[in-house]
Amino acid sequence: MTRDIAREPCLVHRDPERRISHVQDHRRHRSRQRLPRSTCPEARCNDLGIFPAPQGRGTGKPTGASWEAFQRRLSFASADPVHTFPLVEAIARAEQQVGGAPERLFHLAVPPAAFEPTVTMLGAAGLARGSRLIIEKPFGTDLASARALNQTVHAIFDESQVFRIDHFLGKESVDNILAFRFANGLFEPVWNRQHIAYVQIDVPEMVAIEGRADFYDHTGAYRDMIVTHLFQVLGVVAMEPPTSLDARHLRDETAKVFDALKPIDVTHVVRGQYAGYHNEPGVTPGSQTETLAAVRAEIDNWRWAGVPFFLRSGKRLAASRQLVTLGFHEPPLRMLPIHSKHTPNGRRNEIAIDFADPGSITVRFLAKEPGATMNLGAAEMIFRYADSFRAANTLEGYERLILDAMLGDQSLFTLAAAVERLWDISTPLLENPPPIQPYAPDSWGPQPALNHLTAPYRWHLPGAGSPS
């Protein structure tokens, strides 16, 4: 490639048989180096499997026949709110080449400040009617900004045209939570407060802010990860059985979960910052932005009342994982001898759902150790996607979601009201955040605060024998 597509709007028209146009609008004042990975077109193409990902960190040039075929269908045009003609002309030309009655998909992989002028520009140019709109996170930074963004979008686009994208919801292993629960009589009957003591959704990351200080220092871990990603996974884990898997019923059930969430209690929040964060290029001196956030959330409904949901995500932690853990109540075990050395992770039964691609599910339980006496030891059963199904059938998160947007399927996309509800329950925390606590890079975050948050339970990560 000879042009910087992170600086220029581009029109991607798919194979004529697909009858779809895909538009990405990137504002000129952002360089590729400062774009989050989710907004870098080359990274997006890697996610879609269009061309091979480069080895290691950094950027690489796409190669191969698949890329060459894709590149021939790319066209570029510059536009701004005043001069929209080049974009309108480019879209008209692409649609003529596609033929028939193609549909338009606008993918707003733009900085938050560019949402309003970009949406307004599309409306003024007459491009909104009959089109679909993908909006990348963040969907606002608080309740007021989320409402303002939704009002701007709804002035131009109907909610049925809007696709608020979260790549976590496009993961096969997150989608599999629905199958695991609702397709198996073994699990759904115990998926409630009578049997489950706690739920954890844990997404630690080993990476630092990776040159994103201009975005991250104004956002932090709670806004960047917990509101946008982890609460969405919570909605999938905690929903009631939908009557069908269509968009209306699925999103109605997750919306009910969000409606039942209690406002965040700031005494049940840990905010941390890794040592050396202030030395990152672009970080404000003395910044109080958290690079780790952990919260205890509670759902006030009949299924989950009294069950704590522990959500944690942060940078420069000891491992990169994406894990949902459901811990079950302990049965009476007085008649069954057990030694702590044989059960380093405790007595509790757990289901651990690893939703990092390709994904796995582990069921941990106690079993009798061989011998003449009744002694218990830890055991587990593991399902791995990589061992069980054809990898060729797996879709990346963005690959799945962009396909769904092309088909007009909103099942895995977030409603405006749901976005506003999550910011609403976050208001106590955003208005009165607890103080930052430092933690060492490559640790599991600030202690003993994190352990106090989950007491009397324990974090599933790190495992036994790992440093905390």
Image (tube, rainbow, N blue to C red):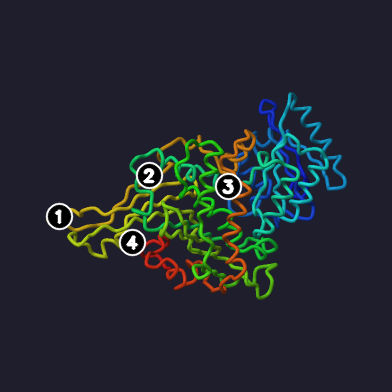
Marks 3/2: CA–CA distance: 26 Å
Depth-wise, is mark 2 or mark 1 nearer the camera? 2
In contact (CB < 8 Å): disc 4 and disc 2: no
Q: Residue at the top extreme?
A: 100
Disc 2 designates what residue? 188
SS type, badge 1? loop
First of labels 1, 3 by sequence position: 3
Residue 126 drawn above or below residue 112: above
Circle 1 crowding by C-alpha within 10 Å: few under 14, some 14–19, many from 20: few
Q: Position of residue 256 (x, y in %)?
A: 52, 49
- Residue annotated with mark 4: 345
Q: Secondary structure at mark 4?
A: loop
Q: Position of residue 242 (x, y in %)?
A: 47, 40
Position of 320 relative to 25 (above/below): below
Residue contact between numbered discs 2 and 1, judged by CB atoms under 8 Å: no
Q: Identify the image quadrant of residue 220.
A: bottom right
Which disc is residue 167 wearing?
3
The tag earlier along the polypeptide, 4 or 2, is 2
- Say which label, 3 or 2, has the lower sequence index: 3
Amino acid tagged 3: His
> Does the CB distance between marks 4 and 1 fall below 8 Å?
no
Mark 1 vs mark 3, CA separation in Å: 49 Å
Q: Check disc 2 and give the amino acid type.
A: Glu
In the displayed orientation, state which residue is furthest to the left. 372
SS of the residue at dot 2? helix
Answer with left or right where residue 122 lies relative to residue 256.
right
Answer with mark 4 or mark 1, whichever residue precedes in sequence: 4
Q: Which mark is residue 371?
A: 1
State the separation of the CA atoms marked 4 and 2: 25 Å
